[in-house]
Structures are given as structure tokens and as C-alpha cells.
Amino acid sequence: MSGSNTTNFTNSSIFILLGIPGLESVYVWISIPFCTMYIIAVLGNFTILFIVKKETSLHGPMYYFLCMLAVTDMVLPTSILPKTLAIFWFNSREIDFSACLTQLYFIHCFSVMESGIFVAMAFDRYVAICHPLRHSTILTNHVVSLIGVAIALRGGVLVMVHPLLARSRPYCRTNIIPHSFCEHMAVVKLACADIRVSSYYGLFVVFCVLGLDVFFISVSYSQILRAIFSLPTKDARLKTFGTCSSHLCSILAFYIPAIFSSLMYRFGQNVALHFHILIANMYLLLPPMLNPIIYGARTKQIRGSLLQLFTYKRT
């Protein structure tokens, strides 16, 4: 390991991922819940995609956005877990510089895309509840497709700056990344040059992109709640609010650890490193695992289709 902690290496060099420093003795035990969450995430989101494709009654804006979310939730954990498990099981810590930047790009690109999908889903709920008679004319298949393209372009273009800035920096201090994957700030902090542009741009993405997304979601739900409370009966209010409960649970599962992890990495110098890395991994593993469970359990149409699927197989 001492040979890796050297100076004068180039951008074509190999980086060393430390994994979770301080918890090396329990890597095998940590890998068990990590694997479990990943398997549930992949199988659960694949099931969502299969059910929506199979059931023509689910071919609508809400479920199209849910399919976008499912694809994102399969890519995000897949971008980190294979390498993390290679560290845990085989002590395979080396990663090529280009592969590191590719992993960095996928992590942050699909995180921004997932945030955009939640905004689109909030807009869908707003139109469905506040303007139900115009829902089919406002959110046509063409409009949903344009929203999906805009979400993908926003994530792809905004995050492309991260690896471009990282590649332009000289790296001459150390090639050891104290993390289990190539997180943006963990990589650029290794550069022997001024990284303020990368740091400021990262904060711009966090506060302006995610912050604006949270703002738009909040505005949508303020209008939704106003419409719900204007309904005449308690049963009607509960039933209407129930159509939003899955979305709200997924939002909380995504944004709380995302914002906490990002801020902790920049300002939480007194937080134990292994705790931060665990939180960062949970942020990329937990929401993809929870989303299909939340939507499968709380969405009547998906739950019914899933029960019909299993019933049909048994018969």
C-alpha cells in the first residue's frame, strides 16, 4: 500500500479505493446487507417495468414516470456495488482513472435525473388532483416523452462538467481515494491544483438543481394540499391524499440522505470517515430498494397486477 501513496503520477494512472477505512474486519458482514439491498432493488424495479409493460391499463403518465424512476434505480446501485463488493471480497482496490471518472459521471448524472423525475411526478399529481379534467390533454404521451428527454439532458449536460474539470487537473499528491467509490469531491481533493471551481460548481448543482427541484415539488404539493382540504368529506380527502403517499415517501427517502451526505462531505470535518462513507452508500442503495416496495405496496393498480401475475402463475 505504501507504494501507492506516491507522487508524480499522471491522469492515466491507477487510483486506489480504500473502501470503508476502519471497518476492514467486518467487510464480509457489511457486504451481506449491501448485496441484499441491491438484489431487492434490481428485482423490484425490473418487476415494476415488467408489470407496467404488460398491463395496458397502466400505460399513463404516472406509470411512465415510474418506469423512468425504475430504470434510474437500477443504474445507480449498479454503478457502485460491483466495485465495492470487489473491495470487500477480493481486496481489489485499483481503478483506472478513466473508469473512476466514468463511475463519478454515472453516479451524479443519474442522481440528478432521479431528482428531475420526482419533480415530473409531482407535476403529474398536481395536474391529476387540481385539474383532473385536463390531465389527459396536458400530459399527453408526447409531453411525457419531452419531459423525459429534458430530464436526461439536464442530468447529462450538468454533470458532464464534473469529469471534465476533474480530468483537466494535475494529480501529483496521492492516488488513494478514501472512499468505496469515486465520489466527486473525494476525487478532486486529490488534485495538486486549485479546486475551487469544482467545489463551487458542485455546490451549484446541489443547491440550485436539487434546491430548485425541492422548491418546485413544494409548490406543487402546496397546491395539492389546498385542493385536498377543499374536498367536502374526510373520506374523499384521505382517498385523494393516498394517491400521493407513495410519491411523498420516495421523495423523503431520496432527498434526506442525499442532502445530508453532500453537506456532510463538505462541512462535516469532525464526522468519522467510515460513517460518512456508509451514509453515502446508503444514499445510493436504500432509495432504489425502497421505491419498488413503496409503490408496490401503496399503489392499488400495481399491487393488483402483481397479485394477478402470481395467481396466474400458480394456476
Image: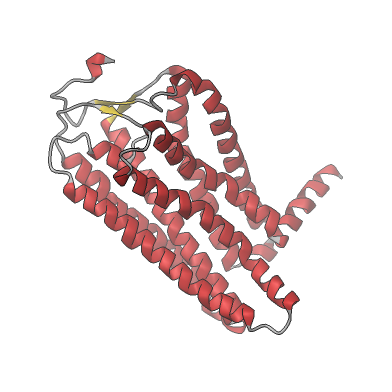
Q: How is the image coloured?
A: secondary structure
User: Residue 117: image x %, image y %?
Assistant: 48, 60
Total numbered circles:
0
Relative to 22, is 160 on the left or the right? Answer: left
Any part of residue 132 in sight: yes
> Could you say which quadrant of the image residue 261 lies in?
top left
> Could you say which quadrant of the image residue 271 lies in?
top left
User: Residue 215: image x %, image y %?
Assistant: 41, 68
Relative to 273, is 232 on the left or the right? Answer: right
| Residue at screen point 54% across, 61% down | 65
| Residue at screen point 30% across, 45% down | 266
The image shows residue 28, relative to residue 277, as above or below, that is above
Any part of residue 136 in sight: no
Relative to 68, is 169 on the left or the right? Answer: left
User: In this view, which residue lies farthest toward the front?
Assistant: 270
| Residue at screen point 57% across, 67% down | 61
